[in-house]
Image (cartoon, rainbow, N blue to C red):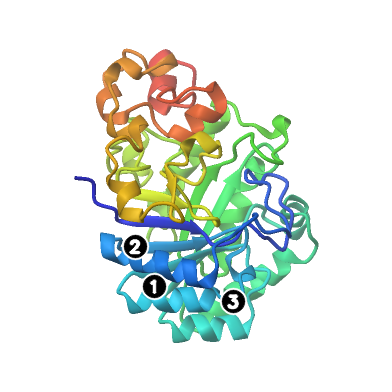
């Protein structure tokens, strides 16, 4: 039996900015037929009933949804942790008041440049960087914990050190570094190569121990795996992709996936308008790419790897995006080291 622990919920696809690397192509428009407040409240009940421990509200921009605080209040009332991923541009003292009333301890924000020129260009709107710096400072004054997610590509990889300095200056607590995928609006020429990936890993391995008392630096699931750098990167042990194992992604129209980053509709396992969440989660045929994985399914550079049975080919979304196949992670640090590519 698989235990659902975490849900990342795109409560709306609507967004107030226009990021150049957005994999889902979010803009000011909602996804057709997004869940109503009543439907969303019912889903929250189902998440609690199935034993979910943490719900992350994302988008689009989650604060674009007018009833976000109603949903968050219900999540918290039913004993689940509620967290947020936001671009920060809508956040003001009124929103911070509500978050405080909800008992929120942590909010995550996106920062993709070390200065206004880079960040605002990537985010497609002037003033986003400066407002985010105000948000950071205001939140620290009010006692919140701040997380930052940086999506790295050719357009900003040279600014990792600068972003780090900005976060240290503004008292950010946690920094997750992830990689962009060639989906949605992401320019193909911004795609990273193997050397870029390894240099990012070296950056994390070098800086995490140095700043761990004031800024926790970690990598996302899209990079890593059994490297000599792994002990220094915050990933204690990689047990394979969590999609459908203990985590789900919920689309704003009720579609259920193992991971929201897996954009193809073929990864939608069901919709809560047609089935209960429990029925979708407990269906033995769902999330088969992870739950029913066989070593014989490993492909590409992963085929024959001694860690294949544990790793299952790294990040499913990364493999599918770059190779068109699952269980075939093209950017494996262990493989790069073994073959002398870095």
Which residue appears at 27% of the width and 65% of the height? 49
User: Which label's residue is closer to the chain start, 3 or 1?
Assistant: 1
SS for dot 3 = helix
Are there few (<14), some (14-19), or many (20+) residues within 10 Å of tag 2? many
Q: Is residue 146 left or right of residue 125?
A: left
Q: CA distance from mark 2 to mark 3?
A: 34 Å
Instruction: Say the numbered circle drawn on residue 47.
Output: 2
Seen from the viewer's position, the closer of residues 312 and 66 is: 66
Q: Nearer the viewer, residue 294 or 137?
A: 294
Q: Position of residue 138 (x, y in %)?
A: 59, 80
Mark nearer the N terminus (1 vs 2):
2
Q: Is residue 132 above or below residue 58?
A: below
Residue shown at the point (68%, 69%) measured from the top left = 89
Residue at which label 3 appears: 137
Left or right, 194 with reference to 128? left
Contact between labelled residues 2 and 1, with CB atoms less than 8 Å apart: yes
């Amino acid at each position: 039996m698989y235990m659902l622990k975490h849900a990342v919920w795109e409560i709306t696809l609507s967004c107030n900015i226009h990021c150049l690397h957005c994999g889902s192509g979010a803009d000011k428009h909602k996804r057709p037929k997004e869940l109503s407040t009543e439907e969303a409240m019912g889903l929250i009940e189902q998440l609690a009933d199935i034993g979910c421990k943490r719900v992350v509200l994302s988008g689009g921009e989650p604060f674009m949804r007018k009833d976000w605080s109603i949903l968050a209040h219900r999540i918290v009332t039913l004993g689940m942790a509620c967290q947020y991923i936001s671009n920060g541009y809508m956040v003001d003292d009124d929103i911070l008041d509500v978050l405080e009333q909800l008992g929120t301890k942590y909010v995550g924000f996106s920062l993709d440049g070390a200065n206004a020129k880079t960040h605002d260009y990537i985010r497609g709107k002037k003033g986003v960087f400066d407002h985010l710096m105000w948000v950071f400072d205001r939140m620290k004054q009010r006692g919140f914990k701040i997380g930052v997610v940086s999506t790295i590509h050719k357009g900003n990889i040279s600014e990792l050190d600068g972003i780090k300095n900005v976060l240290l200056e503004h008292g950010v607590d946690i920094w997750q570094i992830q990689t962009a995928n060639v989906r949605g609006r992401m320019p193909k020429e911004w795609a990273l190569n193997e050397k870029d990936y390894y240099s990012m890993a070296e950056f994390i391995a070098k800086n995490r121990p140095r700043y761990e008392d004031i800024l926790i630096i970690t990598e996302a699931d899209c990079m890593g795996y059994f490297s000599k750098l792994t002990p220094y990167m915050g990933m204690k042990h990689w047990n394979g992709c969590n999609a459908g194992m203990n985590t789900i992604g919920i689309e704003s129209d009720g579609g259920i996936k193992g991971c929201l980053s897996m954009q193809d509709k073929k990864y939608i396992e069901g919709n809560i308008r047609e089935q209960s969440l429990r029925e979708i989660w407990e269906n033995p045929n769902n999330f088969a790419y992870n739950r029913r994985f066989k070593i014989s399914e490993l492909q590409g550079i992963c085929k024959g790897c001694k860690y294949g049975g544990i790793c299952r080919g790294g990040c499913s979304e990364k493999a599918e995006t770059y190779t068109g196949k699952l269980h075939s992670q093209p950017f494996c640090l262990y493989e790069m080291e073994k073959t002398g590519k870095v």
